Image (cartoon, rainbow, N blue to C red):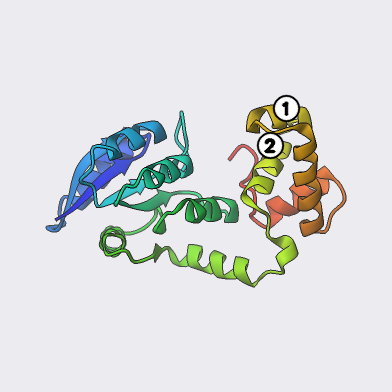
Amino acid sequence: MIRVLLADDHPVVRAGLRGMLATEGDIEVSGEAGSGPEAVAVARTGGYDVILMDLRMPGGDGVTATRDILSAGSAARVLVLTTYETDADILRAVEAGATGYLLKDATPGELANAIRAAARGETALAPSVAERLVSHVRRPQRESLSVRETEVLAHVARGATNAEIGRRLHISEATVKTHLLRAFGKLGVSDRTAAVTIALERGILPPVGG
């Protein structure tokens, strides 16, 4: 029996997933969490084989929760289940250690098979996500932003100043400027507005307000 932890901030979504998986004889939903920190706490109780992790939740996102769970030595496999498929979201999840990345429009059969694959330690990716990862790898290196560069640029997109970004990310203003300059170089631009525009067009950043 594959024991699953559902981590999603919407009770209706969790109820739907629980009902969807109830018909699978080899899969059992054994726990639920409504936020990233709660998922980390519940995962500590152990015994879970797969954690279905939403990306954007209040009080702590799914990427941070994934990183915290796996760094604590959990043997559970994290399978991201989200509505978001930007390059930035996918790369952050993969870099945090997620075994797979599915979208919420997956069919019940696709979800169940992905859970089984994750439990075996296999990678499970939605076709569109796999295509994005391949495209990212094939791009010129100058376009590939680091996780920190992407975070800094995301704050710029929300209108934050360098000083505000530094406070939010707990880094110096000079370090913020360094990350921005590196991002400018990789994107082939010379200012903040152009960098944000290009990053949005290429899906490196999610739509502002999205």
Q: Residue at x 86, y 46 (%)?
A: 191
Q: Name the residue under label 1.
A: 164
Q: Which of 146 and 160 is in front in this view?
A: 146
Amino acid type of the residue that numbered disc 1 sits on in the rendered structure: Glu
Mark identifier at residue 155: 2
Q: Residue at x 80, y 52 (%)?
A: 184
Where, by quadrant of the figure, is residue 136 drawn?
bottom right
| Residue 152 % position (x, y) | 69, 41
Mark 2 or mark 1: whose residue is earlier in sequence: 2
Amino acid type of the residue that numbered disc 2 sits on in the rendered structure: His
Mark identifier at residue 39: none
Q: Work out whether residue 85 can be spotted.
A: no
Alpha carbons under labels 2 and 1: distance apart: 9 Å
- Label 2 crowd (10 A; few <14 / some 14-19 / many >=20): some
Task: Report helix, strand or loop for mark 2.
Answer: helix
| Residue 66 % position (x, y) | 42, 45
Task: Report helix, strand or loop for mark 1.
Answer: helix
Pointer 2 and pointer 1: residues touching (CB < 8 Å)? yes
Where, by quadrant of the figure, is residue 176 drawn?
top right
Q: Where does the C terminus fall, quadrant-wise?
A: top right
| Residue 92 % position (x, y) | 54, 51
Q: Residue at x 68, y 36 (%)?
A: 155
Above or below: residue 35 compared with residue 192 = above
